[in-house]
């Protein structure tokens, strides 16, 4: 086995209760990610990591494996991606079933092209020295035009040390492009994770996707729901 897709589906969402199984276009949210992985040619195995027996049952019915229930101690609000991926790798190592690569597929980014997943996997596998690949999209507004509040209480440009704001008013074309991680697909090296204790490291390939909506709030869910209703091709491409 070369590439394993891991789909994390924690049950304790606060913003949208049981977000990962909430229906989108008539299907549980997690099904959008599972089906995209099933249609990707380079993914050999799909495992859902969840702390919920209910979620596990739904995922198995859709066609993913759920070989364990994730411990509650690594399924909390502030639990890290490294914790559940390390848990997965330890489980697979004990069964001599470790893959070479992991495709990290977050269910909160449901509108994916299986072809783009394959392209990301191929890009990383064919790279020479990369430590990981991470999907991003270009931010509509450069982060260099974003503000934070200085310790002394004034606004200040986030990329500068002084509080003079006039430079931030320049045209956006004058600033470097900046990119936002979007959860579309991350590709990880199992060997690198085991030897470094890190997921991504310091030589990460940017995989640029179209602007992609993530679901964190009820408003996000409503926006994606409207997009699916207006464009039936999205549903057919992934779910049918």
Image (cartoon, rainbow, N blue to C red):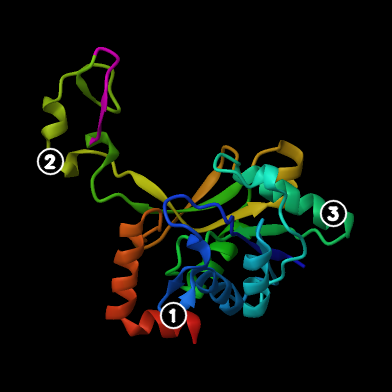
Give the mark, 2 or 1, whose residue is nearer the N terminus.
Answer: 1
Q: Which residue corresponds to the image point at 71% horizontal and 37% vertical from the top-left?
A: 196
Quadrant where the image shows the N terminus: bottom right
Q: Are marks 2 and 1 in contact (CB under 8 Å)?
A: no
Q: Nearer the viewer, residue 202 or 31?
A: 31
25 relative to 211, above or below: below
Disc 1: which residue: 26
Query: Is residue 178 something that shows in the picture?
Result: yes
Mark 2 or 1: in front is: 1
Pointer 1 or 3: first along the chain: 1
User: Going by the image, does 175 lie left or right of 191?
Assistant: left
Q: Position of residue 149 (x, y in %)?
A: 26, 23
Q: Which residue is mark 2?
A: 171
Q: Position of residue 87 (x, y in %)?
A: 74, 49
Q: Which mark is residue 93?
A: 3
Residue range corresponding to the magenta coloring: 146-152
Is 151 in the magenta? yes
């Amino acid at each position: 086995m070369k590439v394993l897709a891991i789909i994390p589906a924690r049950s304790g969402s606060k913003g949208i209760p049981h977000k990962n199984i909430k229906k989108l276009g008539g299907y549980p949210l997690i099904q959008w990610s599972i089906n995209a992985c099933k249609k990707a040619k380079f993914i050999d195995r799909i495992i859902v990591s969840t702390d919920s027996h209910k979620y596990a049952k739904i995922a198995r019915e859709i066609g993913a494996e759920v070989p364990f229930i994730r411990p509650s101690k690594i399924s909390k609000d502030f639990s890290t991606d490294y914790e559940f991926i390390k848990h997965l790798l330890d489980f697979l190592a004990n069964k001599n079933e470790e893959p070479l690569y992991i495709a990290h597929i977050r269910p909160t980014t449901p509108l994916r092209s299986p072809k783009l997943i394959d392209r990301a996997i191929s890009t990383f596998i064919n790279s020479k020295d990369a430590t990981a690949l991470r999907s991003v999209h270009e931010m509509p507004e450069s982060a260099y035009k974003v503000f934070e509040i200085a310790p002394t209480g004034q606004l200040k440009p986030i990329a500068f040390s002084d509080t003079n704001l006039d430079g931030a008013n320049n045209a956006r074309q004058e600033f470097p492009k900046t990119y936002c991680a979007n959860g579309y697909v991350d590709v990880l090296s199992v060997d690198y994770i085991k030897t470094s204790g890190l997921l991504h490291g310091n030589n990460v390939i940017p995989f640029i996707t179209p602007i992609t909506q993530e679901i964190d709030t009820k408003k996000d869910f409503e926006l994606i729901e409207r997009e699916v209703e207006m464009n039936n091709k999205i549903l057919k491409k992934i779910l049918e």
